[in-house]
Amino acid sequence: MAIASLLTLLDDISVILDDVSVMTKVAAKKTAGVLGDDLALNANQVSGVKADRELPVVWSVAKGSLVNKAILVPLALIISAISQALVTGLLMIGGLYLCYEGAEKVVHKFWPHAGSNDPEQAERVAANANESIDLVAHEKEKIKGAVRTDFILSAEIIVISLGTIAAAVPLLDKAVTLVVISLIMTVGVYGFVAMIVKIDDLGLHLQQKSSSAAQSIGKALLAFAPILMKVLSIAGTLAMFLVGGGILAHGVGALHHGIEHLGDLSGVFSGLTTNLLNALVGLVAGLVVVAIMTVISKIRNKPAH
């Protein structure tokens, strides 16, 4: 009896892990937009910090990210238990926010006067150059800011992940899936960020070697680092439109069916057509929100007569 009970337990665990694996893969695909933006944003947050403090800062923000997810996962499960419709609503808001962030990047790219400069980056560089500034206190403030930003991105990841899980899925499966995706995203993002911020240091180190081959590799790494940051930023923005637009389109029945129909008409290019149309929906939705936010900002800042 004991052996039979153990085998039954192992079989149940195997089924749960198999379900969690499938749901985690789907959730990981859906959160690609947030992941790309998360990578670029956190790498930019750390840039400007002194070289010997880069990894400690990344580690501190990563720990803060884990705390954020430890708060958000139970909260998401409670909301899911209360109402699946509420999860759908939060998912739509998350998708719209992704589109807004992506559109804001596009607007700032083509209209630099809209505020594409990074005052925080300049502040970090100035702080490093000024010995009178308490770098420890300054660093702590930057970490707090990065953790606050991570809270928003983590919330998007968890809500989008929860939205990919069917309502009928048992609570335990939902909880394990959210925990697994949270750990994967945290380790993946901050592990990759740590690697990115050290590329230029590795390049400088290799350039100091006597070997001409090492010097060439070092020079290539120094040239590659800013290109990688640019590629991450562009890929992240495109993914935000794809994911955010896909969420919004899926939430509007007529729009979703229309996109699917057009995709079917394109034959072998069905997948590409669907993705392009989802991205277009994301871009348009994002630009509309940016326009609304701009008008609201101007009204608020309008001087009283």
Image (cartoon, rainbow, N blue to C red):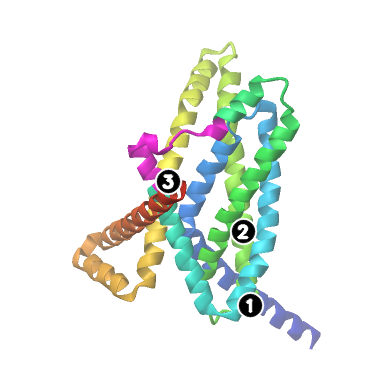
Does the image show residue 56? no
Instruction: Say few, some or many: other residues with alpha carbon within 10 Å of mark 3 (under 14 / 14 to 19 / 20 or more).
Output: few
Q: Magenta span covers which residues?
A: 104-121
For the residue marked with disc 1, what is the amino acid? Answer: Leu
Tell me which residue sits at (61%, 20%) in the image: 205
Q: Label 3 vs label 2: CA separation?
A: 51 Å
Helix, strand, or loop for circle 3?
Answer: loop
Marks 1, 3: nearer the viewer: 3
The residue at 70%/83% (across/down) is 8
Q: Earlier in the sequence, mark 3 or mark 2?
A: 2
| Dot placed on the residue nearer the N-terminal end, 1 or 2 | 1
Residue beneath disc 3: 305
The answer to if 92 sits in the magenta stretch is: no
Earlier-in-chain disc, 1 versus 3: 1
Q: Which dot, 3 or 2, sits closer to the camera?
A: 3
Quadrant of the image occupied by residue 135: top right
Q: Residue at x 67, y 20 (%)?
A: 130
Q: Is residue 138 above or below residue 263?
A: above
Residue occupying the far right of the picture: 2
Q: Nearer the viewer, residue 170 or 131?
A: 131
Give percent across and percent down for residue 229.
47, 36
Above or below, 66 against 78 in this view is: above
Residue 55, position as x, y percentages in the image = 67, 35
- Report helix, strand or loop for mark 2: helix
Dot 3 amino acid type: His
Front residue of 103 and 218: 103
Q: Tell me the distance, in whole angstroms, between the alpha carbons under discs 1 and 3.
A: 57 Å
Residue 171: assigned label: 1
Please determine whether, in this image, residue 117 is positioned above or below residue 206: below
Instruction: Identify residue for label 2.
Output: 182
Left or right: 19 in relation to 277: right
